[in-house]
């Protein structure tokens, strides 16, 4: 008869069960997967809980931007922009790439998180008629990073 071990719900499980790792303990990968999924979902939702981060994502729908362009469009300090970008990047909503002197931020493709992918897809259709978003889009169109950063060509 195979060795029996206790599971998280008090039932006995076969020691050969894929959920069982040894005679002294059990790992519950389905529980871990669910906990990780919940944590990932919460991370994406928390990233979207700030109006400046929502506005930032809406601007990045049009084009990639550097920190100085985002700062000028939103009218917030550079460290605050960097903090927002770090949170959005950790949630899988934003990516970045180096381009000479600048780091360009862009909307992520959603490959890291199904929650980020779903939210980014829906965000394309949300808030487009909002006056604040429309004003922000107009302001961000005229921004030139070379002028903002002091590099005249």
Image (tube, rainbow, N blue to C red):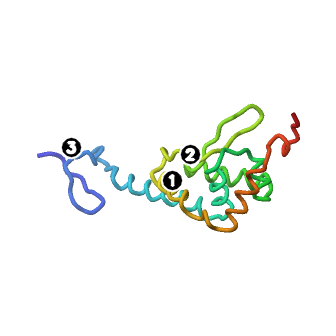
Q: Is residue 46 left or right of residue 102?
A: left
**Numbered disc in front, either 3 or 1:** 1
Q: Earlier in the sequence, mark 2 or mark 3?
A: 3
**Numbered disc in front, either 2 or 3:** 2
10 Å crowding of disc 1: few (<14), some (14-19), many (20+): many
* Mark 2 and mark 3 residues within 8 Å of each other at the beta carbon: no
10 Å crowding of disc 2: few (<14), some (14-19), many (20+): many
* Residue 47 x/y as whole percent: 59, 58
* Residue 66 x/y as whole percent: 73, 44
Which residue, given by chain and number where applicable, does mark 3 sit on?
16
Q: Give 40 or 75, whichever is nearer the viewer.
A: 75
Where is residue 52, by image quadrant? bottom right
Query: Which residue is painted at 30% across and 60% down in the image?
Result: 8
Circle 2 sits in a helix, a strand or a loop, which is it? Answer: loop
Q: Is residue 47 left or right of residue 72?
A: left
Q: On residue 100, which mark appears?
A: none
Where is residue 130, by image quadrant? bottom right
Q: Earlier in the sequence, mark 1 or mark 2?
A: 2
Which quadrant, please, contains the C terminus? Answer: top right
Structural distance between the alpha carbons of marks 3 and 1: 36 Å
* Mark 1 and mark 2 residues within 8 Å of each other at the beta carbon: yes
Which residue, given by chain and number where applicable, does mark 2 sit on?
108
Of all residues, the one furthest to the bottom in this rendering is 131
Query: Which residue is painted at 88% across and 41% down in the image?
Result: 150
Structural distance between the alpha carbons of marks 2 and 3: 41 Å
Query: Which residue is painted at 33% across and 53% down in the image?
Result: 30
* Mark 3 and mark 1 residues within 8 Å of each other at the beta carbon: no
Of all residues, the one furthest to the left in this rendering is 1
* Residue 1 x/y as whole percent: 11, 46
Structural distance between the alpha carbons of marks 1 and 2: 8 Å
Which residue, given by chain and number where applicable, does mark 1 sit on?
116
* Residue 134 x/y as whole percent: 68, 62
């Amino acid at each position: 008869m195979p060795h029996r071990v206790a599971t998280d719900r008090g039932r006995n499980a076969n020691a050969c069960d894929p959920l069982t790792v040894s005679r002294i303990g059990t790992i519950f990968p389905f529980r871990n997967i669910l906990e990780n999924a919940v944590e990932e979902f919460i991370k994406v939702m928390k990233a979207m809980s700030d109006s400046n981060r929502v506005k930032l994502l809406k601007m990045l729908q049009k084009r990639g931007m550097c920190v100085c362009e985002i700062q000028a469009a939103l009218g917030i300090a550079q460290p605050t922009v960097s903090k927002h970008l770090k949170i959005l990047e950790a949630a899988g909503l934003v990516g970045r790439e180096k381009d000479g002197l600048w780091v360009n931020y862009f909307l992520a493709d959603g490959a890291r998180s199904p929650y980020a992918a779903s939210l980014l897809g829906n965000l394309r259709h949300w808030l487009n008629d909002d006056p604040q978003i429309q004003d922000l889009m107009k302001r961000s169109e005229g921004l030139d990073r070379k002028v903002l950063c002091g590099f005249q060509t």
